[in-house]
Image: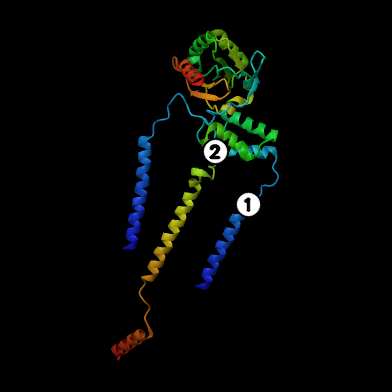
Amino acid sequence: MKTRRSIWLAMFLVAGVLLVFGANRGGGPKTQQERIDLLTSNLACPTCSGESVFESRAVAAEAIRSEVARQVAAGLRTDDEIMGYIEQRFGGQVLLVPRADGLDALVWALPVAVAVFSLFVLFSAFAKWRGNRPPSPSNDDELIVARALDERES
Amino acid sequence: MKSKNLVKFVSAAVGVVVAMFFLVLLVAEPDNDTVARSPLLGQPAPAISSRTIDGESFVLERRKGSWVVLNFFNSTCVPCINEHPLLVDFAEAESRKPDGAELYTIINDDSSESIRDFFARNGGDWSKVTDDNGAIAVAFGVARVPETWIIDPNGVVRLRITGELTEGLLGRQVEMLREDFTS
């Protein structure tokens, strides 16, 4: 039982370390084209459905792509500021990855909250089922059964 | 007994959320207004500069002191063609006023030749501003044409009209804004 608990603990630890590492991993130096591609991949084409600015050939998407490229080349704005510029013009619906602040944060927080709640309910249910198992027979019980069997055979 | 209560509680919570979604759907008004929302409303107009198809320089900031109407246009777009006579009427009416609004066409994904041809056939002697790579459209968040924007003499964006104009709409809106501005 102790070994199993240690394995679970180790797994959670490894998962946690990997998550923290993944979240904070620096992208390293990016080329301008990589920045443009990444930014436009996270922007929705405002006139098409289900296409990003990166892949769409619509006029509006091409205009946004050009503007992102111009701002990246100018080097005056960070990636966040460029995304903010486009968002301010076209509205929050242009972001394919919702922001993690304000009401938008619910998109990220709710699934986690639901998952945690579900796990809690599951663990509670398992614990309850384990508690309801019939008690294992004591030594006296086994002795009584053995005697009864002997009597029947003799 | 406890788990039964929990199930009841969770079911009730889910029921309330679903009911609230339906309530929002029932109460929400359809978003089909001609006068549209934009984060730019009440903000200084984006700093844009370009050239007209006649080669003159166009810097929006230099138009401060006048009411400015920007009409995003493409000569092959049907609503743009439909609303054109209304823009001609509007420009004529405004030219007769001492503080008449200046009208500019912002060319959206169209060639200067097509624009010249269109205006030669359909009238309209106001300036037509080129928008290379759609920078002006992006600065105003214009995804589809036609769109019409009104900017006050302080250079502040006051109104955005998406889609085809209706009879008298633009004149009325400019007049209302003008009254509001002077009062």
Chain of the residue displaying label 1:
A
Residue A141 spot, x, y in % from top left? 34, 84
Counting residues from the start of the chain, the first of labels 1 and 2 encountered is 1
Element at badge 2? loop
State the residue at coordinates (43%, 30%): B31
> Alpha-carbon neighbours of circle 1 within 10 Å: few (<14), some, or many (≥20)?
few
- In space, the residues marked 1 and 2 are separated at their CA atoms by 22 Å
Can you identify the residue that label 2 sits on? A95
Q: Is residue B149 above or below residue A84?
A: above
**Where residue B115 appears, x then y in whole percent?**
59, 14
| Above or below for A94 versus B135 | below
Residue nearest the observer in this picture, B98 or A83: B98
Please identify the residue farthest to the bottom as the structure is shown: A154
Quarter that holds the N terminus of chain B: bottom left
Q: Is residue A34 visible?
A: yes
Left or right of A33? Residue B34 is left
- Amino acid at circle 1: Asn
Task: Determine whether A48 is above or below B128 in the image.
Answer: below
**Relative to the observer, which residue lies in front, B68 or B72?**
B68
Q: Quadrant of residue B128?
A: top right
Q: Residues within 10 Å of mark 2 (few under 14, many from 20)?
A: many
Residue A38 visible within the image: no
Tell me the number on the disc at residue B34: none
Does label 2 lie on the same chain as label 1? Answer: yes
Image spot of residue B181 (x, y percent): 51, 21
Residue A44 position (above or below residue B130): below
Badge 2 amino acid: Leu
Q: Chain of mark 2?
A: A
Instruction: Give the label on residue A24, or none.
Output: 1
Look at 55% across and 62% down and name the residue there.
Answer: A12
Colour mode of the rendering: rainbow
* Residue drawn at (63%, 51%) of the image: A24
